[in-house]
Image (cartoon, rainbow, N blue to C red):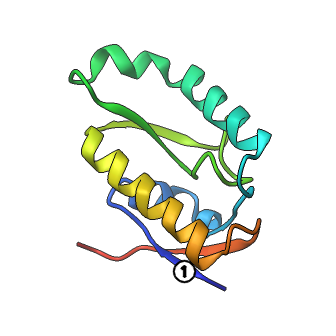
Amino acid sequence: MKKLVASPFHFPALQERPDWYVLDYNGPYSSLTVDNRATVGAHYAYLRPLAPAGYHLDEYPFASTAEGGWPSAMGKMVPPLENLAQGGYLSAFYRFQLKGLPLPFLVVPVPI
């Protein structure tokens, strides 16, 4: 099974829900990913006006996984650079490690 290193935001989520260590990638262009992103965005919309300007809503488990979406995912506002960097790493992981296939993968928390 392929492994992905978790970001600092993911640690509290993993502590609360240890079953989220193994996630299932939805695959590219998945309608489930679109639905997950929309439901999490709607549920955590109240955070947007409270966050500094430009911050992004990040979710875990990722919207691109079967475990993402509401009601299971947790949302948090994060600096845009953090969100864009983590999203880029995740996209590269899906493309080069999972070869774009909808497969399970292991999330490994690594303290920074």
* Residue occupied by mark 1: 3
Does residue 13 appear to the left or right of 86 in the view shown? Answer: right
* Residue drawn at x 61%, y 83% as measured from the top left: 2
Q: Looking at the picture, does residue 45 appear above or below residue 23?
A: above
SS state under label 1 = strand
Tell me the amino acid under the disc marked 1.
Answer: Lys
Q: Quadrant of the N terminus?
A: bottom right
Residue 89 location, x and y as percent? 42, 63
Residue 90, position as x, y percentages in the image: 49, 61
Query: Does 60 appear above or below 102?
Result: above
Above/below status of 37 relative to 72: above
Q: How many neighbours does mark 1 have within 10 angstroms: few (below 14), some (14-19), or many (20 or more)?
A: some
Q: Which residue is nearer to you in this view: 3 or 85?
A: 85
> Position of 27 compared to 81: left or right?
right
User: Which quadrant is the C terminus positioned in?
Assistant: bottom left
Residue nearest the viewer, comparing 95 with 74: 95
Q: Position of residue 7 (x, y in %)?
A: 36, 62
Number of numbered discs visible in the structure rendering:
1
Quadrant of res 37: top right
Location of residue 35 (image quadrant): top right
Extreme residue in the bottom direction: 1
Q: Is residue 57 above or below residue 11?
A: above
Residue drawn where x is 42% and y is 67% of the image: 6
Tell me the residue at 36%/46% (across/down): 83
Residue depicted at x 26% and y 25%: 54
The answer to whether 111 appears left or right of 28 in the picture is: left
